[in-house]
Image: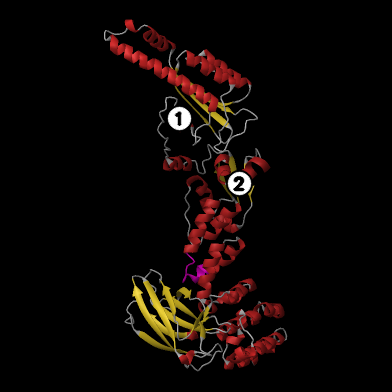
Amino acid sequence: MPFEGCPSQVQAAVEGLLEENRVTNWKISADSANTTVVLRFTKVAGIQNGDDGAAGQRFPPHLEAALEVLLLENRIVNWGRTAERTGSITAVLRLKPVGSVQDEESAAQHPENSSPSSHSGRHHCGRAVRQREQRRANIAQHLEHSTGSANNDPETMERGDGEASQPSRTLKDENNFIRNVSQFFNQKDISDVVLKVGEKKFFGHKFVLAKSSEVFRTILYDKQVGLPEIDLEMSEECQLHFEPFLRFLYTAEVQICVNSAVGILCLADKYSEMSLKTLCTRYMVDNTQSPKVQNALNWYSWAKALHMEDLVDSCTKTISWNMEHLFTLNEWLEMDIDFVADILSNPQLVVSNEFTLYQAVERWLLSDSHLTNLDENSKKLLPLVRFPQMMVQQVYKVETGELAQKDGSKDLIEKLLHKAYRFRSLCPFQADLNITFNEEFYRPRNYKDLTVDTVRMQNTLRFGIQVDVRTYVGPVPSTVREGEWKITYRKSNDSWTLQVYCHDSAMVNGEARIQVVLVISDDDDRVLLVEASEETVCSRGNHLTMVITPPSNNEANLMTVLIKPLPN
């Protein structure tokens, strides 16, 4: 090892630590002014760290003895040490050359031989002696009570002369690093592995692949070590998009579109490339916001399969808010039963009325692709239809309809309709009978038929005035609307504030239990946002206040106000 310029005492200390296999890193450098020794070694076995990660740690005997000798020789310029939580200790020594020490000692001992200004020389030499003695005391104290640097960073250790060094800075050149790595993408000459994907071959680098993916690390270094070519099995969809996926590992960039998103997402999930999976998820969430119903339909099943909750939530909202658009598509009859059940269970569903929803479910159940499993499918889907929220005429149409005559579904429909008739008969007297109807089966969805007012937000004149509206009285659906309400609208910047007041005519036993829902849509009746208030019991002494901030795009033109009477 290069010991040039290093005192023999330090050489002996380093060699002793090397023999004990305690040295993890070292560096010795010398210039015309000083010799610098940087030594990193493991802590003394059996000594426990204190709360600060370094308490109780002394220098090894080899280095401690060397320091004492160098101290006596006045060779130490400054020193520092730090202990890390990982168990390592770093020591930094800056030492004077032997010649300079001798000159200083001579000047201190024979001030009469100094410069003509003897008084100044004696003053300077006396100060040097005092500083040397102070450093000697500091080192002795440090060796006895060393606690290490608080930040565990060798670059910011405390100096032996009491002066704190400047904090270190981290300099980065990420863009240049990425450019340097990206130039090796699919380069045959310097690759060390070939990836076979279908009929295509890609030239890769084990290090780049392994650093990006735990799956690739396992394949390349555990399962198939040394093989020059790896055959990767994947679906045709993934094969089509493997090249942009692989390029991302080299460039941290990916070109993605609606058609390629699923393939790239599946590859990111398959090979545990989590940063790419996160980027794909954000892109897909952004592109499933309402009214992008088709994207939501295409990606919903993938989001469920890959347990991507944010994407599932985005797809579910967009589909649920625009269900009647889905009913008009051929894809509706091709949807699997789990998807249909999920949609029927969603509380944010927006439809004209419950009978419209039932008709769509009936068409799905009686379609050729599902008719053979009518009994099983009916048991899963029909209890999710809220028959009590239909009008009497609609309930009768269900009772006499085609599905009610089928052997696989008629008994179940009969039981469900019995519950609907019971609700209509008993709900008006539930306070006297002490019964409740608070299950989801009895509660209204976001029915457009419950609309009491529609506001064109871009050019309305309703600010600060009251609008009179009407609903049916009580929670049982009716075509007769005798319950009177007043609504006031106010706008501040981009937010709207609505206040809803109840008249006596809308109350049952002095109160009305309601929920207000605001549906924001565009001119094509595509729903962009749905906001619901808390369930509120309105009476003469209170009112319901609701604040909404519509989407910032110019498509948000219509605000529809629904008042939903709720059962207890």
On screen, residue 387 above or below 14 = below
Q: Quadrant of the N terminus?
A: top right
Mark 1 is surrounded, within 10 Å at the Cα level, by few (under 14), some (14 to 19) or many (20 or more) other residues, namely many
First in sequence, mark 2 or 1: give its number.
1
Q: Left of 465 or right of it: where is 296? A: right
Query: Was residue 105 drawn as part of the magenta stretch in this picture?
Result: no
Q: Left of 295 or right of it: where is 424? A: right
Instruction: Tell me the element at label 1.
Output: loop
Q: CA separation, marks 2 and 1?
A: 41 Å
Which residue position holds label 2? Answer: 214
On screen, residue 452 above or below 244 = below
Secondary structure that dominates the magenta span: loop
193 or 75: nearer the viewer: 75
On screen, residue 469 above or below 517 = below
**Amino acid of disc 1:** Glu
Query: Was residue 291 drawn as part of the magenta stretch in this picture?
Result: yes
Query: Which portion, as a residue range, is magenta?
Result: 287-296
**Location of residue 374 in the rendering, given as x and y in whole percent from the top left corner:** 69, 80
**Location of residue 325 in the rendering, given as x and y in whole percent from the top left corner:** 50, 77
The answer to whether residue 356 is seen in the rendering is: yes
Q: Residue at x 52, y 51 (%)?
A: 275
Q: Residue at x 57, y 15 (%)?
A: 12
Which residue position holds label 1? Answer: 158
User: Which image quadrant for residue 442?
Assistant: bottom right
